[in-house]
Image (tube, coloured by chain):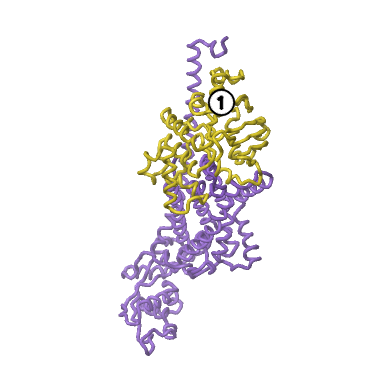
Amino acid sequence: MSNVVQKLGAKKRAAIIEASLKKRHAKERRLRAYGVAAIIFAIGFLVTLLSTVIGNGYTALQQTQVKIDLEIPIAKLLNDEGQFDEKRLRRYGWGSSIKKSFRTNFPDVTDRMAQRALGELVSANAGFELRQLVEAAGPEATLPTSFWVKTSDDVDMLMKGRMDRNLPEQQRRLSDQQIAWVDALVADGKIRKVFNTTFFTAADSREPESAGILGAVVGSALALMVTVILSLPLAVMAAIYLEYFAKPGKVTDFIEVNINNLAAVPSIVFGLLGLSVFLGFFGLPRSAPLVGGMVLALMTLPTIIIATRASIRAVPTSIRDAALGIGASRMQAALDHVLPLAAPGILTGTIIGLAQALGETAPLIMIGMVAFIVDVPTSVTSPATALPVQIFIWADSAERAFYERSSLAIVVLLLFLIAMNLTAVMLRRKFEKKW
Amino acid sequence: MAKKTGIKIKAADVSVHYGDKQALHNVSLDIEAKTVTAFIGPSGCGKSTFLRCFNRMNDVIPSAKVSGSIQLDGAEINDAALDPVLLRAKVGMVFQKPNPFPKTIFENVAYGPRIHGLVTSRREEQDVVEDSLKKAGLWGEVSDRLHDQATALSGGQQQRLCIARAIAVNPEVLLMDEPCSALDPIATTIIEELISELQKKFTILIVTHSMQQAARVSQKTAYFHLGELVEHGTTVDIFSNPKNDQTEAYISGKIG
């Protein structure tokens, strides 16, 4: 008996295989080309994104300052014991003395309108910051006779080349006259650019030159802390229950389908839930990282449950059987043997869930973390904003200086995300056991 | 302890279903104490399924349904009120593929006594570990590296560690599901010698694919085919004078 294949002669057989081989190779090459094209496409987008964000944001690392000659009559600010007197500190005209000193650069300017335009070149917060500087130095310190104070954000933009001098005057934030003054100051060496420490040490402000991301970073950190504390134990317990104890049936199927659905629910819906339940029903504080963390925990739960179940299933059943075989209860088998082996996968899933939560904006807006907060939050119940929300607020602001700050904040957010994903990879490498 | 000739386990009318499929048909078999009983038969004949009935490992499989009666020293083990944990402390198991926990050698052996609360101090734990490893014939090879990873041992050593782990809780019955199928001939010989040694203390049920192994280690043999117990008796009788044609065909290598 011989079948179709056996009936072919050796030559014919070889020819057919060869012909089909050519086709197969061509197909393989095509597939590879598609793959390479897809990767180039993706990398192209990534490079565009990064170059745009960094290109727009790196200038926010610098801040323009102007030199002010000013002798501060420190004796006038002290009380009888030689300490700073709150009342006198408050009464001393910090802002006006800076402006007065600044005007001495241009003695010809006497017109009130022009004097006002001149004053606009210095930051509105310069007086406040000078007071903080003097207070920090202490009552006994010998103060210098000249200070570098921040310029207004418009001068900052001009100095960074982000204001087009060729635009018609009425379309510019600075008039021709103001630009001429700035140029004169530059020529005098009274303008400099320094590293913008404020960006990393301050919370939000109405003045771009005084605004920073520390408040948002701390707010995000507090919210994520709440998220981990709530979602990790809950999710792991739920996953263990579903994998080890739930009897297969309609109820379990229903729960399973719903967990998978929950992972696909738009985040703003979780925000609405938080608004109506946590704020409306339980009366928890508005704008608080506590509530933000709770909402993000709800969102992260399904992600961690799914990751945990997958890693529990990846542990060979032989390990579970071994434990059960010597008389371990199901709980002991799960906690003593399966969970430690599943831990790297659970950790990775958790960190990826948290990274997702870190970048989430919509639900936080719903529960009021979009508020304008000038203080760095100190507890999970103090009003706060979060990093992505801060980016949203700044990107929405009119001032050009906020635009560069929002770009730099995006870079910071991306750095945090990269750090978290790297941690996930490293933890997995470290704890992964082989057998 | 039961006498050498006493009946340790009485299985009567045991059937196992996996969903709609019946894997075991009304098997009745008496197991003698301190004897090695071998279950032989072609693949898929239900011998492993039967073995897993003795410590209720089939409970783990959601679709499995066991009926019939198995009495261990006169007590029904399929009783719903009986905690399988209690049963498995009496009926230990060694699996087909060596499956040490990915922990240290010491932790592997100490785990059983510890969870059952059989040891109360570190000192006692060390005693049990040492004794169990000696009984499993592994002590000489690992005594100086008890705190190394168990997974670093060779396959044969891992299987002996699994035996040490099973006997550390001092069970009365030891189930072995093809314990040598993943091992080389030398490791197999060592395990077979060990089984003969362990027989003095434990009632042993062993599933094996190797006819020679059944002949070497067991005193009783049961031949299974398509989920039915075809023939059972002393190993000598089964191998030299099988009553059933199927048994003879299998033993002489015509089927299987």
Left or right of residue B10: residue A107:
left
| Horizontal and vertical percent position of residue B27 | 65, 30
Q: Name which residue lies at 63% across and 46% down.
A: B82
What tint does the image give chain A?
Answer: purple
Q: Chain of mark 1?
A: B
Left or right of residue A399: residue B229:
right
Residue B239 in the image: above or below residue B114? above
| Horizontal and vertical percent position of residue A39 | 47, 40
Disc 1 marks a residue whose amino acid type is Thr
Q: Secondary structure at mark 1?
A: strand
Q: Nearer the viewer, residue B252 or A359?
A: B252
Left or right of residue A200: residue A269:
right
Q: Quadrant of the N terminus of chain A?
A: top right
| Horizontal and vertical percent position of residue A74 | 35, 84
Residue A100 in view: yes
Q: Name which residue lies at 49% across and 41% down.
A: B167
Residue A43 in view: no
Q: Which residue is mark 1?
A: B234
What tint does the image give chain B?
Answer: yellow
Q: Name which residue lies at 59% across and 56% down.
A: A298
Q: Name which residue lies at 56% across and 22% down.
A: B237
- Going by the picture, which residue comes out furthest to the bottom? A80
| Horizontal and vertical percent position of residue A252 | 65, 47
Residue A398 in the image: above or below residue B39? below
Q: Quadrant of the C terminus of chain A?
A: top left
Question: Callout 1: 10 Å neighbours few (<14), some, many (20+)?
Answer: some
Classify residue A193 by image quadrant.
Answer: bottom left
